[in-house]
Amino acid sequence: MMMKKEKNMKEKNMKEKNMKEKRRKKRKKSSVVELSTKRQIASKFVSSKKPEHTAWNSNGCEMSSFPLPGTQED
């Protein structure tokens, strides 16, 4: 009687373990696909960005294209 219970428990644990493994693999695959599509979208956005949008100051830092109030020449 005990042997049968133990055997059933082992089988149940193995099935559970296999199901968890399958789910984990599915999640892993989908996350990789999502990452690659996100990268593609990001690269499209970066490549479509026009250089006119940014200006560089003398320190080599990026500045906004909007002039600060009071610094605009008339």
Image: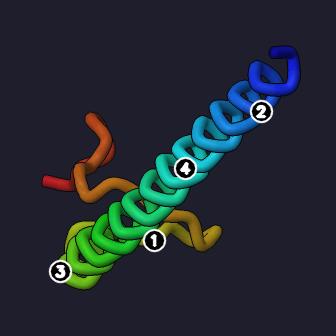
Going by the picture, which residue comes out furthest to the left? 74
Image spot of residue 33 (x, y percent): 35, 69
Nearer to the camera, 25 or 36: 25
Q: Counting residues from the N terminus, which is met first, the one under dot 1 or under dot 4?
A: 4
**Residue tagged 3:** 48
Kindly report which numbered mark, 2 or 4, lies closer to the viewer in this rendering: 2
Q: As shown in the figure, which amino acid type bears the numbered disc 2?
A: Lys
Nearer to the camera, 47 or 67: 47
Q: As shown in the figure, which amino acid type bears the numbered disc 4?
A: Arg
Nearer to the camera, 32 or 72: 32
**Disc 2 secondary structure class:** helix
Q: Counting residues from the N terminus, which is met first, the one under dot 3 or under dot 1?
A: 3
Number of other residues with Cα within 10 Å of mark 2, as a class: few under 14, some 14 to 19, many 20 or more:
few
Q: As shown in the figure, which amino acid type bears the numbered disc 1?
A: Trp
- Residue 7 location, quadrant: top right
Q: CA distance from mark 2 to mark 3?
A: 62 Å
Number of other residues with Cα within 10 Å of mark 4, as a class: few under 14, some 14 to 19, many 20 or more:
few
Q: Counting residues from the N terminus, which is met first, the one under dot 4 or under dot 3?
A: 4
Image spot of residue 19 (x, y percent): 52, 44
For this view, does 63 lie left or right of residue 65? right
- Above or below residue 66? Residue 17 is above
Residue 7: numbered disc: 2
**Disc 3 secondary structure class:** helix
Image spot of residue 28 (x, y percent): 51, 58
Query: What residue is shown at x 21% (from left), y 55% (from top)?
Result: 73
Q: Counting residues from the N terminus, which is met first, the one under dot 2 or under dot 4?
A: 2
Query: What residue is shown at x 50% (from left), y 67% (from top)?
Result: 57
**Residue tagged 4:** 24
